[in-house]
Image: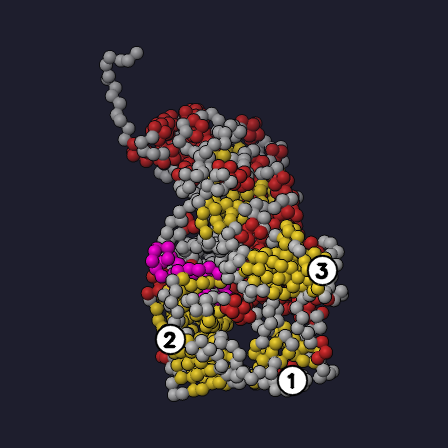
Amino acid sequence: MYSHFNNEPVAKRVNNLFTDRLRQFTSDGEYRSLNLPAFYERERLDGKNHVAIETYAVSDLRRPLFKDALKEADGHWKPAKKGSEYGPSWATHWFKIQVCVPPEWKKNYYKKGDLVVFNWNLNCEGLVFSESGEALIGLSGEERREWPIPDNWFDGKCHTFYIEASCNGMFGNATGSSIQPPSDNRYFRLDSADLVVINSEARHLFVDFWIIGDAAREFPGDSWQRGKALDVANKIMDAFDPENPDESIAEGRKLAKEYLGDTTKAYKQQLPFADGLVYALGNCHIDTAWLWPFAETRRKAGRSWASQLELIDKYPEYVFVASQAQQFKWLKEDYPDLFAKIQKQAKKGRFLPVGGAWTECDTNLPSGESLLRQFLLGQRFFLEHFGSLSDTFWLPDTFGYSAQVPQLCRLAGMDRFLTQKLSWNNINSFPNSTFNWVALDGSQVLCHMPPNNTYTSMANFGDVSRTQKQNKNLDTTRNSLMLYGHGDGGGGPTAEMLEKLRRCRGVSNTVGELPPVIQGQSVTDFYNELLDQTNNGKDLVTWVGELYFEFHRGTYTSQAQTKKGNRVSENLLHDVELLATLASIRDSSYKYPFAQLESLWEDVCLCQFHDVLPGSCIEMVYKDVKKIHGRVIDTASHLIDKAASALGLSGHPSKDSFDCTPVALNTMPWSRTEVVAVPQPHWDATVELAEGVEIQEDSGNALVMMSESGPVVTTQSVDLFKSEDAYILENSQVKVTICKDDGTLTSIYDKENDRRVLSGTGNRLVLFDDQPLSWQAWDTEVFSLGKKQYIGAENVTRHSIVSSGPLRSTVAFTYEFNKSVVTTEISLDANSPLVTFNTRADWHETCKFLKVEFPVDVHSESASYESQFGVVKRPTHYNTSWDVAKFEVCCHKFADLSELDYGVSILNDCKYGFATHGNLMRLSLLRAPKAPDAHADMGHHEFKYGVLAHKGPLGATTVRAAYNFNNPLRVKYVGLSEVSTKQAFSLKGPANLVLSQVKRAEVDRSKKSTNVILRVYEALGGRTRGKLVIDLPNVVSVTKTCALEYSKEKQVVAKSEGVTSVDISLRAFEVATYKVELA
């Protein structure tokens, strides 16, 4: 009955005060003893009668596996105790732990639903092993400190287990910001090694209250759902009594049901599939190296994935995804039992390998062939060990996305793509979440960028809410993906995150407004639903071309030695595969080195991980990379020599006879005639020369004009003149004038086209201040362009003539500035218009950026940059903020600025950063960041670049010149009667078709068959017809395949006089793979 009198007035709630109050209930602050945190535990024991600890310190920063470690430790265990410190950084300590659980705990707590755990906190990473060596669960000292005691350990007996402790935090060993250089002397304190009884109901109330509190803070201010959440949360706090905790906790949980409902444990009670769903997938992005070395990542994978298997057993709705075949391979090698468990859960759809790639690689810097090998290696591994191919390229964290990625994905069996890094753009906001991404050739993939803008959501209320609210394509699809779990340093989701998601689902079921959370589904399920909602993707918006990342532009240049090692390794592996293929066909005793090549490609792909190749790792990673690239280069060089020998090509002239001649070993699919340096001792041993062959002595070598058939007689020559103020290099094609004062080019005159190449001073070294707002190794900012120093006459310490023709003329200039020295040799050969700059640098700068500038006499609103299997055009102006953002871009072997009838290309042999503003072309050379590698790029560098003027727009002349520039001719020796220029595989037709790779087919590994893979692409952007020519007598068939080498289309072949030809037609920028079956 409504009362007649009101003697107890009620005030309107002051929402901000009652909202701010909520934090007190779960805070460890000054009121902790009066609130919930005081009752998370019921008992804690640590005495020797219950916990006994011994330790063994592994020497020399080694990381022995379980059996080896215990063998070493036998007889060397030492007592350990809480409060002790263990280190130094990167050290490994093993702990042997014996626990005796009070048997009464089983009756008093365990059977009543409370959890009994071993609580371990060494403040660093660790992995729990059973006494028999089974990896059980990862510990991190942060969000993971507890290992549930097994059911059968309440028997009053002592039980033994082990913990491998890694002396590093989840994000390495920096003592301040994690992206600063790590400390070599960090120690970790053992703060906890206790048996603990967890008050499970208190823990559950914490999660209940957390989600309700989030709803009170994050639901719209005018929504009844927010008011209701605030009311329920305050009622829970008012009901709590620290003098009677169990009953008041039970009352609090009862009150929570008013908001969450009673379905939070019933994981199967989920809303039916409908628009506006949040697909929640557990995810553990582990950087293959970053603020820790590769060797530590092997252990991070074991720790992280062991923890996820434990959660899979506990939570039936939980599905976890992991990418990177390399990490699965490491796990298989180091933790075979764990790998077997993952295989079983993969069959059940609970632990899902995704991604289809060897690593989560960078996609800006690797060659097109390297990206295809990432997919080939990854997909083969997943198929072999998990029985299926991935349909999704999983790349949540990398620094930009090549325009050809969609095509390469489709060629590797993937039509879906996931990333989110563009949410970090620092100038323009990327406009889409779900869209069709289209490559240069027109191929497309279905792309989704999780709208919460992270791959490490904490599964909070706000994460779920933002996953829908921030979806930028709600007009076409309301479903979104949320990736949750600790990442980068590994770890993955925790039990608390899964409990939060259960409560979020309870909110959706009970009060609505929060989008429903769907669990138990796969990545494939999510994308299939997107396709169903969008008319198979036809209703989605389209983005054509590269996904340029407006951040981390310094990664095109940082860690120059690693980038050079990558380029050299890629080129050598191309040559190995070509020569080994030919040798295996022509010499029955020669065995194609399948296993060695696979291992080499795995190493190269490993070093293309998206923090490694871009240059954003700590120093110890690059010490490893230098060894890896060195091993690849040495092994590949040996394999080249071995294959060449099988083809009758020797690395040295015959000692017993003068009946041999030097020839140029050309691994490019077109003929070449170039000036080649032959070691003088080798030259002296060869006397059979054609009359009129020109020889030029040069620094202990003999320079000779040479082709595949040997030395060439030439009438062409290059002259060197000098005046009072200039050096002049001149051949029949160009005339180059070099200022003696500062070494810059005052003129390049194209004699054949009567054209001035430069509009100002070229080859001008420029030193920019390079102090980005943060992320030193990653970033360079547009404001850095305003503060620069030209390296000029005052920096020249000497200049000289190195050689003066007739085959090559060279002058050298040495510059000294600050603490650095740069020497550039400027060369012109007798038969080429290419001006080459061979540069040596002793680089010792701090936060500086060295570039070289060429103002060219060409005007165009866009410049062209070589990318994977094609070129990308980018603006040379600043019309819009999108144009401004591209003040530094990525290129591969060349950049070009052309008008309709003329252009200039700048080639390089190991650089990737470039910019063209107006008519100023600028190649990025060296950076000097100080974090996270304090010594990044310091020391000696050698690189070369060149300027090539050409008639007409960008064409095949530049494409071929860039390949040649990166793949110099090798000198080999052959008997005079054995000289042959026959090419087994070649292309006829327009020169914009490139035969880029020749290798043996993967099927030949396991079968007694001979199949050759030929990769062809269209390089310039036009539909083109040509003819594939196979000069072998035993061709059975030619089939067009995908990049995984599965047959797709049998080709019509024509045979004539032992030569087989196939007519081919490629779309603009299409990449095509053909399998040639030989009898």
Q: Dot 1, how many residues are within 10 Å of its Cα: few (below 14), some (14-19), or many (20+)?
A: few
> Residue at 68% of width from left, 68% of height from top?
643
Q: Position of residue 417 (x, y in %)?
A: 51, 47
The residue positioned 41% from the left and 29% from the top of the image is 512
Label 1 residue SS? loop
Q: What label does residue 421 carry, if any?
A: none
Question: Is 352 drawn above or below residue 154 in the view shown?
Answer: below
| Residue at which label 1 appears | 690
Residue at x 40% of width, y 84% of height:
726
Residue 793 vertical placement versus 33 (above, below) = below
Relative to 695, residue 669 above or below: above
Q: Mark 2, mark 3: which one is toward the viewer?
A: 3
Left or right of 740 on screen, residue 619: right
Residue under pointer 3: 1035
The residue type indicated by label 2 comes to Thr
Q: Nearer the viewer, mark 1 or mark 3?
A: 3
- Identify residue type, mark 1: Ala
Stretch in magenta: 868-896
**Is there any visible trace of residue 1 in the rendered image?**
yes
- In the displayed structure image, the side of residue 965 where residue 581 appears, left or right: right
Residue 980 in the figure: left or right of residue 324? right
- Checking the image for residue 761, the label placed there is 2
Q: Residue drawn 48% across and 37% down?
A: 533
